[in-house]
Image (spheres, rainbow, N blue to C red):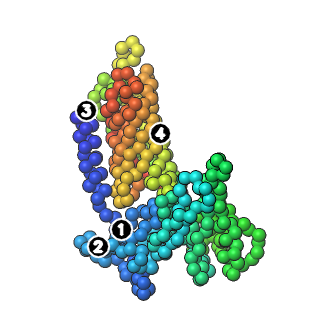
Amino acid sequence: MFFMKQSLLILFLVSCSLLSQAQFVPGYYVTATNDTISGYIKNLDWIKSPDSFEFSTTLPSGSTQTISAEQVKGFYLKEENTYYGSYKLHTLDISQDAYQSNPTHYFDGTVFLERVWTAHALVLYYGKVGEDQRVRYFLETPTGLTELINFSFIRNREGSNVRVKVDNYKDQLPVLLQPYASTNNGTTPGGYHAKELIAYLNSVLGVSTALNYYQTKKEKYIYLLGFNAGVEFLKNYTPNTLPYFTYGITGKVLLPRNFNNQFIRFQYYQTANVGGVDYIGRTMKNTAHSIDIQFGTYIGQGVLRPYISAGLWAFFYPYVRNLNASVITGLAYKKRFSLELGHFANPLFWAQNGRSFMVPPRITVQYEIPLN
């Protein structure tokens, strides 16, 4: 118990310290007079469109400054090959309340929109602004920036609430692209997602799908395969209080950025030569198996990020079968390499006679490889 508490305390202190660290990456910003200023930009892996960013010309000891979207035309992150353009927006902000008439509340402000595609002097931007935080796409042509309208709202009609869908972007796109279309092939816009919008733009303009394509991370699922090794404490199930060597694999899905850095994962572990006693009192050594199914989230925006997850932990050993709720926490480097404290707590202990909240943990290091 003392060891577990010490481990949790150390992990908590390290995580808090790392959360305060800034992650500056090479980049530049474009001034109002089209000058390019190179330096380092704090990459916060923005979930919603930022209205400012932190910049430094010299790191690590240089001073930083906060630059707003009203001051510059945009900024660029070299490692991600991602450009954010500054634009003043006037866009509907939809609430979940029932409207008696059409929505009339607007978000007004200047923010940075993320460029996701460009060809033939046209640029598709992604944005997430306002209180409703819905995804918005914008198409910039030589004549200006146009929001591609797509939203729904609840309308009260004669005492009943009805959801009204407004997808004007399907009519807007053919008109906006008409001066640049290579052929009239009768293609119609698909869903309101980056992949489908880009496919439509490329089809109408006759552009190669690989040309000037900036893949947005907002709508991308990332699949990873991980390999894990460490020690497992099983004193709740075996007479031995010493840790056992354990190893296993992980399958993980990182949800799109709109889901706030959340993930779903499956883990399988084997622990060999686990000592125990059979039903007639004989000592034995066998292989134990455990399975974790977890839903979790990363915390913060740095290269080093703590994470926490909750789910189910199943433990299988001759004459022992256990299924518990569990909590897992850890510290990840670039969401790839991590140090993890597994199943250290059982949040449903109060419903299980004789169980305690604190559980002997599994401590492992893990390395995960992206599959896409």
Cβ atoms at labels 4 and 3 below 8 Å apart:
no
> Is 327 on the left or on the right of 197, as rendered?
left
Residue annotated with mark 4: 293
Task: State whether residue 118 appears in this view.
Answer: no
Q: In the rendered structure, are the residues bearing label 4 and label 1 in contact, judged by CB atoms less than 8 Å apart?
A: no
Q: Amino acid at mark 2?
A: Thr
Q: Residue at x 29, y 61 (%)?
A: 21
Task: Mark 2 or mark 4: name the one nearer the start of the chain.
Answer: 2
Question: Is residue 62 shown left or right of residue 188?
Answer: left
Going by the picture, which residue comes out furthest to the front?
158
User: For the residue marked with disc 1, what is the amino acid?
Assistant: Lys
Residue 214, numbered label: none
Q: Nearer the viewer, mark 2 or mark 4?
A: 2
Image mark for residue 42 = 1
**Label 4 packing within 10 angstroms: few (<14), some (14-19), many (20+):** many
Look at mark 2 in the image and give the residue it sits on. Answer: 64
For the residues carrying marks 2 and 3, which lies nearer the camera in this image?
A: 2
Label 4 residue SS: strand
Residue 251 shown left or right of residue 63 in the figure: right
Q: Which residue is mark 3?
A: 1
Percent of width and height locating residue 204: 70, 73
The Cα atoms of the two marked residues, 1 and 2, are separated by: 9 Å
Looking at the image, which residue is at 26% across and 41% down?
7
Residue 185 at x, y percent in the picture = 76, 72
Amino acid residing under circle 4 = Ile
The residue located at (65%, 56%) in the rendering is: 164
Where's residue 40, x and y in %?
34, 73
- Asked if the residue under mark 2 is in contact with the one under mark 1, i.e. CB atoms within 8 Å, the reply is yes
| Image quadrant assignment for residue 361 | top left
- Of labels 4 and 1, earlier in sequence is 1
Measure the C-alpha gap from mark 2 to mark 4: 42 Å
10 Å crowding of disc 3: few (<14), some (14-19), many (20+) = few
